[in-house]
Amino acid sequence: MEKQKRKADASSIKDAGNKLFARGEFEAASKFYAKGLKIVEAQLLKDNDVDCVGDVQPETVYLKAVFLSNLSNCRFEVGSYTKSVTFAQSCLTVLKELEGTSSELQVKSRALYCKNVLRMARAHFYGHKIEDSITMLEELSTCENEAYSKRGKKMLKQFSQYISQNKCPPTPEALLKQPVRLLRVALMEPIVEYYRFGHNEVQSALDEGPMAKKIL
């Protein structure tokens, strides 16, 4: 009973954070996500107690990964790229714990994994760590998700073309020709990628949709 209440509380906190994120209140959303993360971590510690061996719930592990992903997303939005990468990497580590779980959870886990790899590639790019960005794009290009794999391959191709033409690695300033302000743009094209500050959904920045037809 207590476990179900903890999970319900964490889900409610996540929803509250998502609403703040949708309004562009990223710092406030981060506080909710951090609070939710503490709840699920406490539950996982309790589940791993010697008296509860084998009682760890995969859904709780996945929820922990979601909170880490959302914290990474918030850090990315405010330009804190190093912290964004740190949270995303933690998310990937947690998701690896879900290997061998139910097929439905596997599908969600793999999608979340790809989203964080893509965000890490972007964060490294905007943080001027081009080689690290390329490494993440190489990983993205080999993922099972076809949509993300195509994005990774296209980005790598554009990196290669730029280097071939300019004899040097690309930089955000060189490619975008303008500072990143209220609109996030695709890595290589002047087309809106992240829409305006404040998304309709917490993960809309990474989903396919009407505004994403021409993005990378």
Image: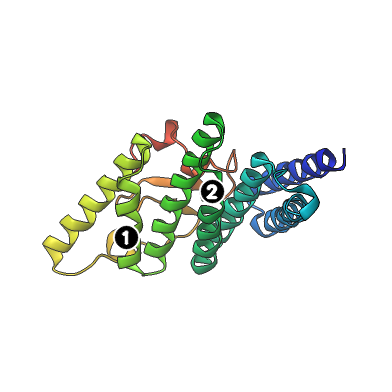
Q: Name the quadrant of the C terminus.
A: top left
- Residue 156: give x, y in percent of width and height: 25, 52
Say which quarter of the image contains residue 8: top right
- Residue 170 is tagged as none
Q: Is residue 122 left or right of residue 29?
A: left
User: Image check: 52 left or right of 108?
Assistant: right
Please name the amino acid that badge 2 sits on.
Leu
Q: Secondary structure at mark 1?
A: helix
- x and y percentages locating residue 16 in the rendered image: 74, 44
The N terminus appears in which quarter of the rendering?
Answer: top right
Foreground residue, 23 or 27? 27
The disc labelled 1 sits on which kind of residue? Answer: Thr
As drawn, 109 above or below 102 = below
Q: Does the rendering let one see residue 182?
A: yes
Q: Is residue 194 visible?
A: no
Q: State how far apart marks 2 and 1 are (Cα).
A: 19 Å
Residue 95 tag number: 2
Mark 2 surroundings within 10 Å by alpha-carbon count, few (fewer than 14), some (14 through 19), many (20 or more): many
- Residue annotated with mark 1: 135
Q: Residue at x 37, y 63 (%)?
A: 125
**Of tags 2 and 1, which is closer to the observer?**
2
Between 134 and 65, the residue placed more toward the observer is 65
